[in-house]
Amino acid sequence: MRSIVSLSAVAAVMALFPACKGPQANSVVVGEYAMSLINDTTQTEYQIVSASRSRNIHGEISVIGEPEASLLISESLLTCDRFDNISGRAKSDGLPDFAGETISPILDRFNGSYAKIVASGKEDLLSEINVRNYVAALDTACYLNAYDKDKIVQKSGAKLVILSSVLSSAFGYDDIDTLNALTGSKVKVISPVHAMLDEAWEACGEGMNIGVWTTSDVLQSGVYAKVFDKMRDQRGDKTAKYTVFTPAQDSTVINRFLDFMQKYADSEEKGRLQALIVDDLSVPVEELREAVKSVLAVDQDSYITYVNYIDPEFKVIGFEESVAMACYKFLRGDNAFTHKIAYPQVNLYVTAASEHDSSYVTVELKDKYLTEDLRNLMIVSTPKIFSEYVR
């Protein structure tokens, strides 16, 4: 069940926090769990969100969601160096962009595949999961283990939260945004789809025409339709459009790209694509960029058809890079960096079944919670996190 909350109620609360900007629509649709917090603001979870009304530059950058995406984003934040840390210009300076920051992924192992949750028609459950994990990220305490009732482990609350799953961009983001508006929370929330679309609009401008390369489960979920339409309305850009496909599986990236372009050529859309958003984690983005260059070079006659559908300034927008850029821009624009002279650090957390009820708890990732599957995932996907932060 989802409920419509009139933003007159939001506006009344937001009047108490004049520095905060509330949503711009006339109403918002809120999930059952988020609505339960709104209806009873004495609940601990609501109070935790409400306590984040003050800026906390020493807070953590929390990455919440399924393990693989959360780890990949966290590794990117640890290692990326795309900006000059002094001037903020897009130029490497030999220092990690998030120097001095603490990256805190909450690996949601308990709830399993988000795609399966959505495919089973339980979108509201996924929204609830994201809200619960968001509250855990903001909390200044977590559980020692599954038997702990009192959350005896102290931690820093988050100043910025990343929803690592593409599906969370449509199922959870709006609920969290509404809670933040009602409480006046200063915590920034970033989702992959919002970050990639913002980057696309910035690069392509009004009336953009972009492609989206995604997985079959995301395609079937309708995430892009939900998020794109809302962002287009907010921007007042009625002519912006996108085309989303899942390319056929193949051994080479270039063949998969050509399959995407063939699908586009066969579609009703005939304009030149200005950018391609890629949220499929199996796609090496740099390799894809090289593939695009080879197609544009028209080394083979068979490529000419596809070149006619590609803008000369065509840009490939990657999942992890886009999220990292959105984080950097927020922290710099809000002067929210810690300004500590230190390499970024990591605190690892994981969700686990509670021993007291049917719910789950957030615990530090160590001892028995570092399962073999998580260890293997880190070794393959996030070598820096595994080598430097897993003990």
Image: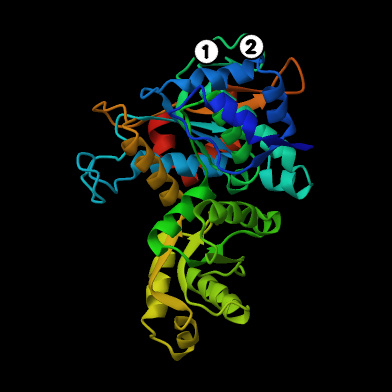
Asked whether residue 27 appears in the rendered view, the answer is: yes
Q: Quadrant of residue 328?
A: top left
**Residue at position x 79%, y 37% in the image:** 1
Alpha carbon distance from label 1 to label 2 = 10 Å
In the drawing, what numbered circle is on residue 367? none
Whether residue 106 sits left or right of residue 86 in the image: it is right
Whether residue 307 sits left or right of residue 151 in the image: it is left
Q: Counting other residues with Cα less than 10 Å from the Cα at mark 1, is it few (<14), some (14-19), or many (20 or more)?
A: some
Residue 55, horizontal then vertical, whole percent: 40, 23
Whether residue 372 sits left or right of residue 305 in the image: it is right
Q: Quadrant of the C terminus?
A: top left
Q: Counting other residues with Cα less than 10 Å from the Cα at mark 2, is it few (<14), some (14-19), or many (20 or more)?
A: some
Q: Secondary structure at mark 2?
A: loop
Q: Quadrant of residue 25?
A: top right
Residue in front for this viewpoint, 47 or 246 = 47
Q: Is residue 72 above or below residue 17?
A: below
Q: Is residue 148 above or below residue 267?
A: above
The three-letter code of the residue at mark 1 reads Val
Residue 136, horizontal then vertical, whole percent: 57, 24
Residue in front for this viewpoint, 128 or 374 = 128
Q: Quadrant of residue 268?
A: bottom right
Q: Secondary structure at mark 1?
A: strand
Mark 1 touching mark 2, by CB under 8 A? Answer: yes
Residue indicated by mark 1: 153
